[in-house]
Amino acid sequence: MLLISNKTLLAATWIHFLIYQNGRVVEFGRHKGLKIPREYSRPGSNPGAATISLKGNLMKNTVVKYGLRNKKTGKLLKYFFESNKGKKFCSDETYELCEWGTNDWLIDSKLTAAYVRENTTEWYNAGYDTPQNAFDKEDLQLVKVTITTEEEDLNIELPTIEEIFKKAYEEKEPIHYKYVMEELKKRPNIKYDLYDLLRYYDYVEE
């Protein structure tokens, strides 16, 4: 398989929670999969709030968001939404906080997050920033989430289609290899797919 040196940093994310509790600020951290708010991805995203620094081919990006953590599970609340298409006198979509799914509920305003912790919104007005909330406020903790990512430029030269089929198929599937080579002579614009590319690198590593 294609290997990348562990000295090459593709992307790293550090998430720290500042917990406001009993007048004290307690900080702890955990590594988490990369989740960067992207423009047009959902209401509440604000890429403009990010702090970006560029040094050489390394770009560092820091975003501050606010959310709610379930004290019982120790996990950030997530959200889901459903369309209100065909319904009258309501928003286009209804958002609701939940504990399952892949997207954490994170917004730009700590005051709004504090409000959502203690209040719910009727379905017809429940948008991303002020969703429906069926949780008890005593079970929720307001948290500050700082997301930092680093991106480093990479250059990977892909093999030619002739190299791919020779190494991936010539020995193990000679009939297929011969057919493709003959077709290449007739139609030089033939493209390979990702499966062929993966076969190429699997073969090299064997």
Image (cartoon, rainbow, N blue to C red):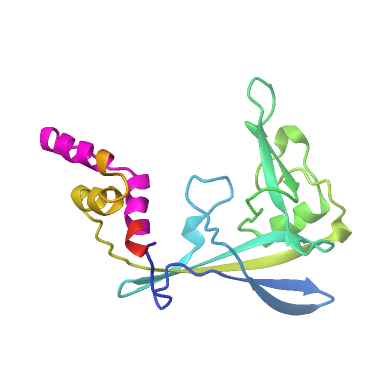
At which x and y percent is residue 112?
A: 70, 55
Displayed quadrant of residue 184: top left
Screen quadrant of the C terminus: bottom left
In the image: residue 76, left or right of residue 205: right
Residue extending farthest to the left is 185
At which x and y percent is residue 86?
A: 65, 20
In the image: residue 105, left or right of residue 6: right
Compared to residue 202, the image places residue 196 above or below, namely above
**Residue occupying the point 77% across, 72% down:** 20
In the image: residue 138, left or right of residue 45: right
Compared to residue 51, the image places residue 192 above or below, namely above
**Residue occupying the point 51% across, 61% down:** 49
- Which residue occupies the foreground of this view, 95 or 153? 153
**Residue occupying the point 28% across, 51% down:** 171
- Which residue occupies the foreground of this view, 56 or 168? 168
At which x and y percent is residue 127?
A: 67, 41
- Which residue occupies the foreground of this view, 155 or 89? 155
In the image: residue 200, left or right of residue 78: left
Numbered label tally? 0
| 196 drawn magenta | yes
Magenta range = 176-202
| 33 drawn magenta | no
**Residue occupying the point 23% across, 55% down:** 159
Compared to residue 184, the image places residue 44 above or below, namely below
Screen quadrant of the N terminus: bottom left
At which x and y percent is residue 154?
A: 32, 66
Magenta span main SS: helix
